[in-house]
Every structure is written in structure tokens, then in C-alpha cells.
Image (cartoon, helix red, strand yellow):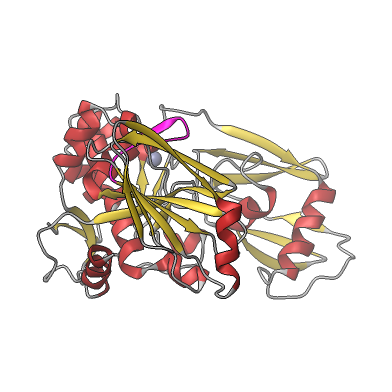
Amino acid sequence: MLRLFLITLIFSSLNTATFGSETPIVSVRVGKSLRNILVTGLDLKRHLFFNNDVKTYTGKKTVKFNCETFTTLNKQRNKPILLATLESPTGLLSYGNDKYQGMFKVITNAKGDSCDIVNEIPMEAYISSLLTKEMNPKWPIEALKAQAVAARTYALNKIRTQQVTKELGNEAYYDLESSEKHQVGGNFFDATESTNSASIGTTGEVLTTASGKIEPIFFNAKCGGRTLRPDQVWHNKEEGYQSVNCPFCHNIGPKAWSNSITRERLKSFFLWASDQGYIKEQLSGDLSSIVLVPDDIDKFTVNFYINDRPFIIEKAVLRKFFGRFIFPSNTFSLKKYGEGITASGEGLGHGVGLCQMGAYAMAMRGWSYKKILSHYFPGHVLKKLY
Ligand SMILES: [Zn+2]
């Protein structure tokens, strides 16, 4: 716990000038809302915190936590409690079908009705196994290195800002989820020689803003021709982001897409957008006339006349309402189609930050990871923190 406390202390006062030389530890939630937890390892050391009981098991051992028996502990305090830690001197722990390095923490979840399991792992090991999940270990090393820097920056920002703790309003005991909400981490066997080289080859390197801050660095599967700024998709302004052309990803990955939307669905969309405040003027149920103004794939917004009054809609809002199946990406144009419209676009994902298919194509052409990163993040600076 002292180590954890010290790490928290380091990150809470982190700036790029004073950061120490040690590798940060990342706490990743790998399982949540569990009734039981089974962890297996060799010569396991198990520390139960509620009675301060430390036990070492010789040989291979599976330790089971029945979470329902622990949850009564949570009645007094409406926040997670650290129940136990598990470590193995061999460094490998099995949970579910996966093997993990580092340490496990078992905590009660915020509601107190089940347990979560958190893996504490050195940053570079985390990045190496993540590359297999978030990219492809068979891709060229320079693309993997660019992804490693992006993912490391993303994780360090989460640690430093303690965003998870802020969202839960209490101690969270973890920095990131292993899910699409944050970034998908891997397990020990996901790491390969190539992902290890990419991680170790960029040890401690992050992208900072021009003023030296570690802000979130985003990545997407395929931008479809041009990347977007965070504010064009989620309304959050992030320093340094620019929308850049990406002629690299056109012929790689998912093909261009096209989907139709009926007039009735379009009506529902406008009423929802008005309700949610995405349209300045309040719309009532009577939308007798909806006319689309000719659109272009390069535009981030689209214009409509509704009952003869002009309205501007951000394209990302359409994707938010209709979902990823109708709008696989935010790079598209709309056309009138009968009574409804057709959306035709390119790409896969939100389109913000590093374009993974583009990075692949650049690396195949011999671009270095530094050149790839400076293309997608021209307003950011590559810095080695440790
Ligand atoms: Zn692209």
C-alpha cells in the first residue's frame, strides 16, 4: 500500500520535468461484478486486509474468494474496500482463462454487492500485451511503436488525473478498465517478441501538449480520409489536436459503407436531438417537411430545412443516435433517397487521433513511428518521461 501511495503521490504532482526514472505501475480492472473469484499460481502469497492475515501456499494453489461473504463489510461505507492482494514469486497469476504478470487486488465494488479484480502491472508489460488487443502483433514494428506511445500516454493521463476515482466519487483502486470504454489490455500470452520490442523500444515515451501536459491521446481503427478533433466528436476540447488528412488508409481494412434511413427514423432523430439540446430550437411533434441541403464528405456538419427553418447538425450526433451499425464512422456524406436519406462513408470508429490502418500503411512505406506520430499529432511533442 505504501508503494501505491507513493505512486499516487508521484503522479498527482506529475509534470514532465520532475518525473522520476522508475517505471510506473498501472492498475487495470480486469473483472467486475463477480460473485466468486478464483486465482491460481505457484507459491501464492495471499494478504487478507480485514484481519491482516498473510499466508503463503507452497506449490500450485487455487485461492477462492466468495464475494458474497465479504460484501457485508461494505454496509458502513459506500465505497470500495480492498479485501486482498495476491502475488506469486514466479510472477504469473491465472485468472479465468488468462495469465497475468504483477499483482492482483480483490476489491468490493462501489455498490458493495460483488467484487472486482484489479491487475497491477508495470507500464511496459501492460503496453506490450495491449498492442496485441488494440492493434496486431504481426503489423510492422514502427506502427506498433506509434500505438505503444499513444496507449502509454492514454494510460498515464488516466493515472495522473485519477479520472476513474473522480467518476466514482470515491477510492477506486484502479486507473483503467480493460474494455472499449478505455483501452483493451491483454494478458501475459498476448505479448510477443514484436510487441515487447515496440514497448521496450519506446520505454517512457509519451506525447505531451506543447505546454508539457499529458492529455488523452486517442486512436481509431480507420479514419476514412481525415482524422477528427475530439471536440468534433465528443465536444471536449483537447489542447493540440488537429484534423489531418489521411490518404493512407483508403485501401486497407473495411471497405466504404452505405446505409439508408427512413423518413420516420429521421423524424425520431430530430425530436431526440431537440430533446437532448443538440438543436438550438425546440422541435415539436409536427415535422411536416424535412429537406436535406446537399452535403459533402469533407464537412463535419450537415444542414437541413425543417418546416422551412434552417438547422445545423453535427455529423457525430447522427452516429450517436443511429449507432455504429448504421454509421460505422464519422466520415460520411448524406444524400436524399426517396422520402428518407442515404449515408455513404469510409472508415471504422470515431476517427479521432491516430488512424491505425493509416499507421500500418505508413510503416509499410518505411515511415518511422516518430514520423507517423508527428503526422497525426502535429501539435504534440514526443517526450521521454522515464
Ligand atoms: Zn486514416
Quick one: quadrant of the C terminus? bottom left
Q: Residue 248: in sight, yes or no?
A: no
What residue appears at the point 29 percent right and 59 percent down from the top-left corner?
A: 156
Q: Nearer the viewer, residue 351 or 172?
A: 172
Q: Viewed as shown, does residue 17 lie left or right of 67?
A: left
- 101 part of magenta stretch: yes
What residue appears at the point 29 percent right and 40 percent down from the top-left corner?
A: 101
Query: Can you give x and y, in whole percent of width and height, for residue 198 in the image?
Result: 20, 37
The residue stretch that appears in magenta? 95-102
Query: Can you give x and y, in whole percent of width and height, for residue 11 in the image?
Result: 25, 68
Quadrant in the picture for residue 160:
bottom left
- 195 part of magenta stretch: no
Determine whether 363 is above or below 349 in the image: above
Quadrant in the picture for residue 361:
top left
Q: How many marks?
A: 0
Q: Nearer the viewer, residue 292 or 191?
A: 191
